[in-house]
Image (cartoon, rainbow, N blue to C red):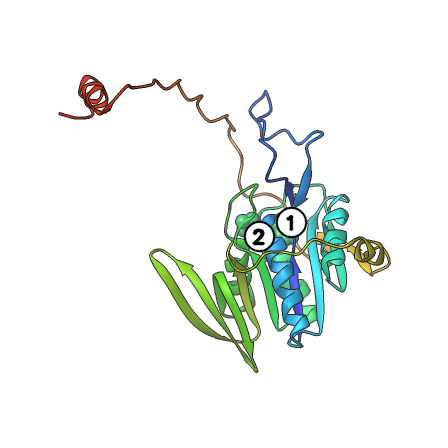
Amino acid sequence: MKIIVPVKRVIDYNVKPRVKSDGTGVDLANVKMSMNPFDEIAVEEAIRLKEKGVATEIVAVSVGPQKAQETLRTALAMGADRAILVMTDDEVEPLAVAKILKAIADEEAPGLVILGKQAIDDDSNQTGQMLAALMGRPQGTFASAVAVDGSTVTVTREVDGGLETVKLALPAIVTTDLRLNEPRYASLPNIMKAKSKPMATKSPADYGVDTTPRLKTLKVTEPPVRSAGIKIADVDALVAKLKEMGVAQ
Ligand code: AMP
């Protein structure tokens, strides 16, 4: 069984985003970029399925600029077998990404597509669901456990207030939640090996997808600055203060 893992190059999760002074977006100049953390979990899960003998090949796919090659190399160094870069300098919205992934899935016929539940830059949480709809295949989102058994996959989902377990017929779409696994670091020999693994470069047009945005960003602003707190000596003083502020009676 083949597994496709879409990986997005995003601003590193340790970096505090700065908003551009003209309010048109987040400033990405000279900012550290990395693989979306949920996608690292997706790559790890695919590798574990390969190690269990369930998967035979892992194909990492990224839609983005030339530099997304680095993200794909990271996936290859972790253990993916080959990569497809769908190169574009445009901002690509989830629907367009899902359409490209659908076209790739039509060509590659994977048993599973494992995506992150969301990209931490746009926080859309849409691509996996849209892909499942476009492919007309079942989806198990927010996975905290994945077990493939013959022609089905059992996915434990993190839902409000507990866990839900669903069984899906393959091919299926899974999106990863934080607790699914802890992604491995690529070893130096594997980083070297990854350099010679195959990477195809395509364009959205190769898949017949128009990536023209459907949304217009009106304005991006910094969150309001938090006003300074005050120290309170004891509980009585706290209650008095809350009364003064009209929060308590
Ligand atoms: P989103 O719907 O944007 O929150 O993204 C959810 C997931 O879709 C991500 O975790 C990735 O697995 C995948 N994805 C989104 N955008 C891209 C992209 N440009 N290239 C590859 N995968 C993507």
Which element is circle 2 on?
A: helix
Residue depicted at 68% across the width and 71% down the height: 51
Residue 23: where, in percent of width, then height? 55, 24
**Residue identifier under label 2:** 38
Q: Quadrant of residue 106?
A: bottom right
Which of the two discs, 1 and 2, labels the residue nearer the N terminus? 1
**Residue identifier under label 1:** 8
Residue 97 in view:
no
Residue 209: where, in percent of width, then height? 66, 54
Of 101 and 183, the residue lying toward us: 183
Of 190 and 208, the residue lying toward us: 190
Q: Quadrant of the C terminus?
A: top left
Amino acid at pointer 2 = Phe
Residue 189: where, in percent of width, then height? 83, 56
Left or right: residue 194 compared with residue 131: right
Q: Quadrant of residue 238?
A: top left
Query: Alpha-carbon neighbours of circle 1 within 10 Å: few (<14), some, or many (≥20)?
Result: many
Residue depicted at 76% across the width and 47% down the height: 70
The relative height of residue 111 versus residue 10 in the rendered view (above or below) is: below
Residue depicted at 64% across the width and 42% down the height: 10
Label 1, label 2: how far apart the Cα atoms are: 9 Å
Label 2 beta carbon within 8 A of ligand 1: yes
Label 1 beta carbon within 8 A of ligand 1: yes
Left or right: residue 230 compared with residue 25: left
Which element is circle 1 on?
A: loop
Nearer mark to the viewer, of 1 and 2: 2
Q: Quadrant of the N terminus?
A: bottom right
Residue depicted at 64% across the width and 74% down the height: 52
